[in-house]
Image (cartoon, rainbow, N blue to C red):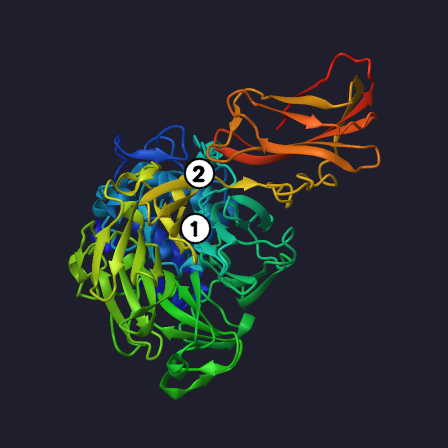
Amino acid sequence: MNFDQISPKSMEYLAKIAESPNKFEELTLQFITNRESDNLKVPEFSDKYEWLNTSDKLSFDGNLKKKLCVLDFFTYCCINCMHVLPQLHELESKHTIEDGLAVIGVHSAKFPNEKVVDNILSAVLRYDISHPVLNDGEAELWNAMSIRCWPTFVIVSPEGIPLLYLVGETHKETLFKFVEIALKYYGDKGMISNHTLPISLAKDNLKTGLLKFPGKIAIDKSGTHFAVSNTGNHNILLFDDTGIVYSKIGTGTPGFVDGSSAHAQFNAPQGLSWHGDDIYVADTENHAIRKIDATTGLVTTITGTGLQGDDKEGGKSGTEQELSSPWDVEFASAPGVDQDKEEGPKNCMYIAAAGTHQIWSYFLEDGSWLKKGSQTERTCIRFAGSGNEENRNNSYPHKASFAQPSHLSLGKVKGQNVLFVADSESSSVRTVELKSGAVKACVGGERDPMNLFAYGDQDGKSVDAKLQHPLAVVYDQQDDVVYVADSYNHKIKKIEASKNTCSTLTIRGGVGSTDGQMPECQFNEPGGLALHPNKRLLYVADTNNHRIRVIDLEKNTCTTLPLIESDSKDSPVPLEFKALVNIQRNPPTVLEKITRDLSSVVSARVQLVFPEHLHFTEGVNSKVQLSLSDMDGEVISFESGEIEREKKTFGCNLSTHHANKDLLLKVEMVLYVCIGESCMMKSYVIQQHVTHDVTSTNDVIGIEHQVVV
């Protein structure tokens, strides 16, 4: 008996239990005893393997002895591997390590980028994997055990005997039943131990700021409102062009709940797109499309059931239609004859259905369809893609195939409206003509539609250009080019679609977060792109750096835009006297009365005192405003400006206009500060009642304020 024979034996077992489901336990016990007599042991884990989520290495002859093990052979780019993670989480909740079950992820990489343990760590954190993971970067264990597909579960006995191979994502019921029977079988034989394992979860040491693995970014038509899918925090952030976050949509806890911004829940949202005052969100792990009313924050579900589906045809209405891992959404006119209109309504939402490797359409209103057909409002239906995971181009949209489409962008090629598609698993960018549905190659990939390993990092034309798992595309109408987030090469590239040529903007490459001139800028698996509608600015969701980056296409530079949580929507720049801080949300600090000569001018000074490790946010100026008013609230004079960063001070002279009466000095401050990578906005109001005394020799008002975070 060898490892090549385990898969056929497993398939025979699966056929038997499918034929006789009422004999599941009997057939399972018989299968286990047969495997025990095969005299085959799984290879021991090599000492050179790198481990995650453990404080020490694991071994079958050591701490895994007397544990039933489930090995999950996976690669973190794979959508099917993502689909089984909730199954494993549920299995681990049902049967703990103390019960005798150990789940171990064996990461056998597809792409070179996935062999790097730091990148695997980011994926472990992003997907909230809570079991041990080892890096089988050179696929030694994969090859030794004759594994052929991602994902593959291998169930191993407490003595290290390989029992069962389950290939693919559709074996949840069999997995759960087999594990339960095997635990009882080995427990009755005294072969199960309740000892613990050296688990040390990486997420317990993760420190991020407001952003955690941002997936995608979108900008409204005016260019003043931005939205980012804060994937790792399961919410959506709305912010302005200065980085001030004025709204959080979602509780931050994974779930599937409609309602207000404070009560709604998402689960690892990815792509999003503005449509008027609404934001449509691909709520990936809820397998649904959600809509946010940006004016009220109300969240509703548009289509999808909240559960993963396997339908590859569609045609149902709204929330009756199941979806599988939608990864992005884009708006355009409906397919077919509507494309002949010069400026047709964007009445159709196109969905990158990564889980079924297709492009779907959702109709916001009645619209045209392929072959002069039509569809009714709220219909959700397959537009292009057979559902097979391939890089197959075809003039007939249902005969074409995609491989995990991850981002869509409306654009033009030679006058035709198309969707540019970041087809991540084929490492290519492709187009879909909206009039006919024809799917065509653009750059990357391979002519052989079955070859999904044609990746690299090479400029060039058509298939001679090579990408590595691109996750985002955006069309630039002004220059008639497409920008690409070549995610696993950590680069931003540019495509001339009319010529099918690709060139690199960020030449340096490598993982990093360096700002500056574009050739030297660095990223870490950038996953989202958005082009400003009025400025030559390209915004990047730099996923593994937990940052938003801004590329100035005219200056050829890249900078980081810090996001800062606001506790006030008031304008931070008073052009005429206006309260700088919302006093209802920020009750003032009232100081004891002081006496000064208020017959002419007073000199006011503010000194800030910071706790250790607190510092001003780089690139953002903190605002301050000082005003004198009479006791009826009428402002007499004011000065505004910026806090001096080094000395943390602000000073000015304020005229009393010969008031010769008691006045109120009000200090308003909007401070942008950080502790490490965590940045925030803090607002303060300080009131100082000043009694007028002409005999006073002191006309200076000094205020020291301790900043507390």
Question: Can see residue 478?
Answer: yes
The C terminus - image quarter: top right
Front residue of this view, candidates 536 and 420:
536
Q: Nearer the viewer, mark 2 or mark 1?
A: 1
Front residue of this view, candidates 536 and 327:
536
- 700 shown above or below 345: above
Snapshot quadrant of residue 116: top left
Q: Secondary structure at mark 1?
A: loop
Front residue of this view, candidates 702 and 259:
702
Determine whether, in the image, residue 262 is placed left or right of residue 447: right
The residue under label 1 is: 215
* Residue 443 horizontal/vertical position (percent): 22, 61
* Residue 633 horizontal/vertical position (percent): 80, 37
Q: Which amino acid lies under the numbered mark 1 shown in the image of this protein?
A: Gly
Distance (Cα) linking label 2 and label 1: 42 Å
Q: Residues within 10 Å of mark 2 (few under 14, many from 20)?
A: many
Snapshot quadrant of residue 326: bottom left
Find out whether the residues at labels 2 and 1 contact each other: C-beta distance under 8 Å.
Answer: no
